Image (cartoon, rainbow, N blue to C red):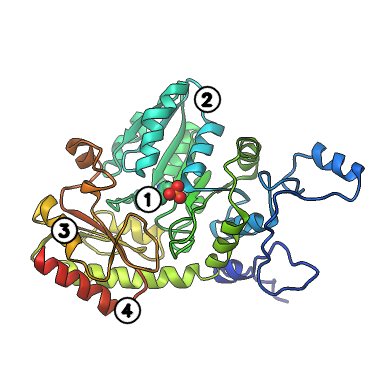
Amino acid sequence: MSEPSTPGPETLAIRTQTRRTAEKEHSTPLFLTSSFVYDSAEDMAAAFTDDSLDVNIYSRFSNPTVDEFVDKVCALEGAEAGVATGTGMAAVFSIFMTFLNQGDHILSASAVFGSTHTILTKYLPKWGIASTYFDMTRPETLEALIRPNTKMLYLETPSNPGLDIIDLAWVGEICRRHDVLYVVDNCFATPAVQQPIRFGADLVIHSATKFMDGQGRVLGGVVVGREELIYELYLMTRNTGPSLSPFNAWVLSKSLETLHLRMEKHAANALALAQALEGHPKLSRVKYPFLPSHPQHAIALRQMTNGGGIVAFELAGGVEAGRRFLNQLNMISRTNNLGDSRTIASHPSSTTHSKLSEKERLSVGITPGLVRISVGLETFGDILADIEQALEKA
Ligand SMILES: *Cc1c(COP(=O)(O)O)cnc(C)c1O
């Protein structure tokens, strides 16, 4: 007799269902309730003596719709447990507050999301927590930056917006050797493309706002990892209150059912766009993880199933050309979000990263003419045509 096979990732994303009510609804029910009732005073008392993740007391602590979203992310990332948060930044801040103490040091990739950079440099020092950066493009310098009080190593791969990639398994070995908590923001790849826990990450975080929602509707965040770590995080978040709304969890849970299908199409469109643009006379560089010209292409092939949905390119004409390009777009949206079914263009040096100095921008790979395209699901010819006509005039 053959062993029962484990369900595939698409099946897990579609069929993981935490609750079905007595109404026997087929689709995921939405438990839009702030609290839960008890049959007796004794049941109520018992719920409050139990700090487990299983009893529903109050939706700041747990909620069945939120649990379903978390269970799906755990299944997709290969994680034991998770906690959902109202935004990606709430997830980032909550892990810092749970696992870092006064006197600790965090070593972070320099190319991290802008608000993460602000927490590291502006707020953590208020609580006596020091941070330093390592350069994703010079991984050989990383290990020497670990200090005796380094508690956490934090990174994003591919990075935003430069699409730098680091060898997840190699970093995992360094973290184990130095007993450092290894945290990966997997927002750009999603678990459909890359599962950092397989490569040794202790905690994986997401802004669910991006590809997980996939249609630019709701904000959300999630942290998944080993049970004992998540339990500590849960005890912190149920008191500090960054909870995800059950409504947003319902939207996200339904969205995950199409994550693999969407990521395949995002990546197919992104690869075709990167290939079509490479060598364009107005561009000095096109960057995409699955282009052989990407500096860490071999690592990308090892740890990602496709190149993801983001393409970056550098306009030879610098800042002004970047602005002109954005202004010439007809269909493609000028907005800062990413991971939407609609193709989005942004120009980091004049928008998201304009508050950094030129030197700081360059140190994280943001050159003046860098444009980031979050490649959507429209007909490919329409995406390419809009970009080509805007490049003509840029
Ligand atoms: C957007 C984003 C975040 C923050 O998520 P929010 O949901 O906007 O709070 C964190 N990390 C990365 C890589 C992101 O793209």
Residue with the mark numbered 4? 379
- Disc 2 vs disc 4: which is toward the camera? 4
N-term mark: 1 or 2: 2
Residue with the mark numbered 1? 157
The secondary element bearing badge 3 is classed as: strand
Find out whether the residues at labels 3 and 4 contact each other: C-beta distance under 8 Å: no
From where the camera sits, is residue 168 visible? no
Q: CA distance from mark 1 to mark 4?
A: 28 Å
N-term mark: 1 or 3: 1
Residue 311's place in the image compared with 181, above or below, is below
Q: Residues within 10 Å of mark 4 (few under 14, many from 20)?
A: few
The secondary element bearing badge 2 is classed as: loop
Q: Amino acid at mark 1?
A: Thr
From the viewer's perspective, is 228 left or right of 142? right
> Residue at the spot x=38%, y=59% of the render?
302
Closer to the camera in the image, 154 or 281: 281
From the viewer's perspective, is 192 left or right of 143? right
Closer to the camera in the image, 18 or 356: 356
- Image quadrant in which you'd find residue 344: bottom left
Q: Quadrant of the C terminus?
A: bottom left
What's the mark number on residue 101?
2
Q: Position of residue 223 (x, y in %)?
A: 54, 47
N-term mark: 1 or 4: 1
Q: Amino acid at mark 2?
A: Asn
Q: CA distance from mark 2 to mark 4?
A: 50 Å
Q: Position of residue 391 (x, y in %)?
A: 13, 66
N-term mark: 3 or 2: 2
